[in-house]
Amino acid sequence: MTADLILAIDQGTTGSTCLVVDTELRVLGRVNHEFPQHFPRPGWVEHDPEQLWTSVMKAVADALAQSGAGPERVAAIGITNQRETSLLWDRKSGEPLHRALVWQDRRTSGLCADLKAAGHEARVRELTGLVLDPYFSGTKLRWVLDHVDGARERAEAGRLAAGTIDTYLLWRLTGGAVHATEPSNASRTLLWPLAGGGWSDEMCELLRVPRAVLPEVRPCAGEFGRTKGVPGLPDGIPICGIAGDQQSALFGQACFVKGQAKCTYGTGAFVLLNTGTEPVASKHGLLTTVAWQLGEATTYALEGSSFMAGAVVQWLRDQLGIIQSAAEVEALARSVEDSGGVVLVPGHAGLGAPHWRPEARGLIRGITRGTGRGHLARAALEGIALQIADLVEAMAADLGSPAKLLRVDGGAAANDLLMQIQADLLGIPLDRPKMLETTALGAISLAGLGVGLWPNTAALERAWQRDREFEPNAGAAGLGELRKAWRAAIECA
């Protein structure tokens, strides 16, 4: 039987999704399995690696069953992952030293503040394109090494392996044979120089992370290893494409040309703009990061991140109980003409770019006796869109030219009202593709390139399909007042 399908593993913050796709990019099977989030203290967010792995294995099995295709038809596996979430495990037993510290985790805020106070941030930004913030993996690894008994000694002796979630999944899928990652994930650790050339000795020394624990770094498309001992999969399936979730979405959105940009509305919201083969240093609070590496050629991006997007809607559902399902938020927000002066700042996990204030907290401002559920729902959607407007404007300032178009994806991009609010705030069109799961599509595309199912990125660009374009409403009322109220609220968060 011909091996002609791609299996994509999209390992996200709240669940693991697997897709089975053919060479025409038709989705034959798609399954998501959620897994528990752990919050041992305020500001701490953890994942149990075994629960995470179990969710992946369930999603793989169920997606294959849904597709009706046997696992022997899988030509290659692609992986995309929540990026900065990281962990360490024993090389021999595979036992994790601690739960994975999630990208939202803020426990290293004090360490980051100390490093800033010591004058290190300018050098960190120069080397890595990043800022000193607990968002990134390096300080998370430092925390585990400092707080688990005997961890540092075992690490320095080469007995431990460290990695972001792609590295951990690759290790498990290959039966422990491969400890590797690729530049888009490596560039989110604070340990990888933008210029490439291997892990930075200077940053490893600064963060006290031994190089002995770090994985090999390989290009994004190409064989990383082959399956071995994976339940439900035959041995020998090549794993041929890996990228961090946001870079994978940029690739899946076919933003292969310098100047093209996308925003993914997932748990958080992330804007990436392709800057070509040269990194662009930001003067407006954005990150400079690796987009992908194909062969010897590296593409770079500017990135802006807001930590709460879809998670705001989850919060309305799970903590406030004003909706029963995430899908209800659009209808509830449409039940009012505007937010009634209410402004919601989604700073629940601190503020990311361009503010970089880990100490910030969420804020609801402007409540009156007339405020109802609909106003809160609409203010939540506006808060998501206002964050993105700040990021896109910062990118325009760094590039010296305004944005002309934004491609959008992710679960919350299905919300037509949110997309229209976003287009109105930005004053530019939004393009929404037929396949919203472009994060997984990026992993599919990279794996297909790696195994030779597609010849080049031009073939992938031709396969991209638009679902809908959202044109800005030039006559949208109250945008100036909304932006003014937003800026005042941000200062108070």
Image: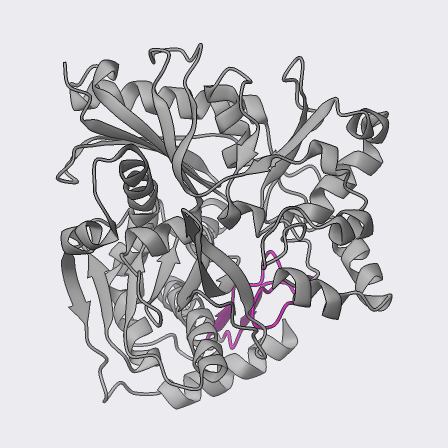
The residue nearer to you, when weighing 162 against 343, is: 162
Residue 338 in the image: above or below residue 95:
below
Residue at (60, 42) in percent of width and height: 102
Q: Residue furthest front?
A: 296
Q: Position of residue 291 (x, y in %)?
A: 44, 56
Residue at (25, 22) in percent of width and height: 74
Q: Main secondary structure of the magenta part?
A: loop
Q: Position of residue 245 (x, y in %)?
A: 43, 47
Residue 422 in the image: above or below residue 91:
below
Q: Quadrant of the C terminus?
A: bottom right
Compared across the picture, whether 13 is left or right of 436 comes to right
Compared across the picture, whether 182 is left or right of 358 comes to left
The residue nearer to you, when weighing 15 against 67, is: 67
Residue at (44, 65) in percent of width and height: 277
Q: Position of residue 438 (x, y in %)?
A: 30, 49
Residue 91 in the image: above or below residue 252:
above
Compared across the picture, whether 336 is left or right of 103 comes to left
Q: Quadrant of the N terminus?
A: top left
| Quadrant of res 50 | top right
Magenta stretch: residue 363 in it? yes
Magenta stretch: residue 425 in it? no
Residue 416 appears in view:
yes
- Magenta residues? 342-367
Compared across the picture, whether 408 is left or right of 87 comes to left
Residue 63 in the image: above or below residue 400:
above
